[in-house]
Image: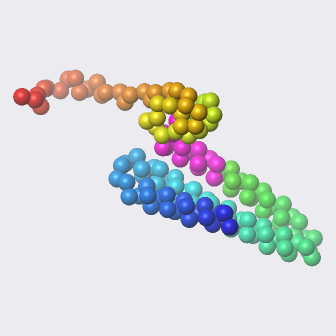
Amino acid sequence: MSFIDDTVVAAKEWFDVASKKTSEAVGIQKLRIAIAKKRSELSKEYETLGRAYFESVNNSDMDEVLAQMVETIELTKQDLADLKAQLDAAKKLKVCSVCGQKNPAGAAFCNGCGAALPTAAPQPEPAAQEAEPAAETEE
Ligand SMILES: [Zn+2]
C-alpha cells in the first residue's frame, strides 16, 4: 500500500525536521504535518471509494456515491499538490528552469542537468544599523 508508505515517510521526514532548531523549520514542519494528514485523508477516501465500488456491484444506487467519492478524492489530491508546492516554497528550493529538478537553496548548479541556477538575492542589511554608535569596535 503505497499511500500508507507515503504517510510513514512523511512522518519520518517530519521528525527529522522537528529535530532541527531553525525558526524557518517551523513553517516547513507545519506544512509537513499538513501533508501527512492530507495523505492519510486521501488514503481513507480511497478506501471508502473501494468499499463503495464493492457495494455498487449489486446496488446501482451506489453510482452517485461513487461519483461523489471520485470528486472528493480529486479535491484532496489538489489540496495535497498545493501543500507540496507551499512546502517547496518554504524550503526555498530552486526549481531548475531547464529540467524541473528541485535543488537546495544554496545550489549554484542544477543537480539534474548541471545548468546554472539563479543566485539568491542577499538579505538586505537593515539601514538603521548605520546610525548606531560604533560601541562594539574590535580592538
Ligand atoms: Zn536542471
Residue 41 appears anywhere in the view: no
Dominant secondary structure, magenta: helix
Q: Quadrant of the C terminus?
A: top left
Question: Going by the image, does 77 lie left or right of 88?
Answer: right
Front-most of residues 29 and 72: 29
Q: Residue at x 48, y 58 (%)?
A: 14
Residue 11 appears anywhere in the view: yes
Residue 129 vs 75, above or below: the answer is above
Question: Going by the image, does 28 lie left or right of 23?
Answer: right
Query: x and y percent of residue 129 in the render?
Result: 23, 27
Q: Is residue 83 within the magenta segment?
A: yes
Q: Quadrant of the N terminus?
A: bottom right
Query: x and y percent of residue 78 in the render?
Result: 68, 50
Q: Residue at x 43, y 36 (%)?
A: 106
Front-most of residues 135 and 13: 13
Query: x and y percent of residue 36 in the render?
Result: 57, 60
Q: Is residue 113 within the magenta segment?
A: no
Question: Going by the image, does 60 lie left or right of 20?
Answer: right
Question: Going by the image, does 81 lie left or right of 138?
Answer: right
Q: Residue at x 74, y 54 (%)?
A: 74
What residue span does the magenta drawing correspond to?
A: 80-94
The colour scheme used to paint the residues is rainbow
